[in-house]
Image (cartoon, rainbow, N blue to C red):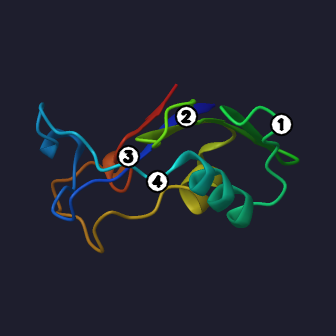
Amino acid sequence: MSWDVLLLNLPDDITSAQDIPDDYTPRPLGRLHEVLATVTRAEPATDLADPTWGDLTGPTWSIELSIGSEDPVDSIMLHVWTGTSWIRSRLLLPIQPTRPRHARPERAGTLGARGG
C-alpha cells in the first residue's frame, strides 16, 4: 500500500483537510539547510545525497521525501510504501484525542494523508 503524506504548518484549530481555507498559505517549515538538518537529526539514516529528494528505507517499508529546492521550504511530501498498520502506528498521529461517534475511523488522525 502507498500513502502520500503532506507535511506543512497549519493553524492549531485545523482538524480536517476541509477546514483549510482555499486561500491559505502555510508558514514555511524553515530554511532549506535547517529542514535538511532537522531531517538528518530526526532520522540519521535518511539518504539526502540529492537534497531535493530524500530516501529512507526499512525492512518492510520505504519513504521518499520530496523536499524540493525552494528556500524557504513550504512543505514536504512523503511518499510512503508500507502496510496500513505501520503507517498508522508510526507516522499518523491523532489530530484529536477523541473522535465524535459519527466520525469514520479511517479518517480519524489522517489529516492530509491519502492511501492508494
Q: Residue at x 17, y 63 (%)?
A: 100
Above or below 8: residue 115: above
Marked residue nearer the N-terminal end (2 or 4): 2
Q: Quadrant of the N terminus?
A: top right
Above or below 22: residue 102: below
Q: Answer whether labels 2 and 4 touch (C-beta < 8 Å).
A: no
Q: Is residue 43 left or right of residue 67?
A: right
Give percent across and percent down for residue 25. 22, 39
Question: What separation in Å lies between label 1 and label 4 (alpha carbons)?
Answer: 20 Å
Question: What separation in Å lies between label 1 and label 2 (alpha carbons)?
Answer: 23 Å
Q: Amino acid at mark 1?
A: Ala
SS class, disc 4: loop
User: Which mark lies nearer to you, 1 or 3?
Assistant: 1
Q: Answer whether labels 1 and 3 touch (C-beta < 8 Å).
A: no
Decide: few, some or many residues near mark 3? Use Cα within 10 Å; few <14, some 14-19, many ≥20. few
Question: What separation in Å lies between label 2 and label 4 (alpha carbons)?
Answer: 24 Å
Question: What separation in Å lies between label 3 and label 2 (alpha carbons)?
Answer: 13 Å
Q: Amino acid at mark 4?
A: Gly
Q: Which residue is mark 4?
A: 30
Decide: few, some or many residues near mark 2? Use Cα within 10 Å; few <14, some 14-19, many ≥20. some
Q: Which residue is mark 2?
A: 3
Marked residue nearer the N-terminal end (1 or 4): 4
Front in this rendered view, residue 113 or 101: 113
Residue 62: name its quadrant: top right
Q: Residue at x 38, y 64 (%)?
A: 94
The mark found on residue 49 in the picture is 1
The mark found on residue 106 in the picture is 3
Q: Amino acid at mark 2?
A: Trp
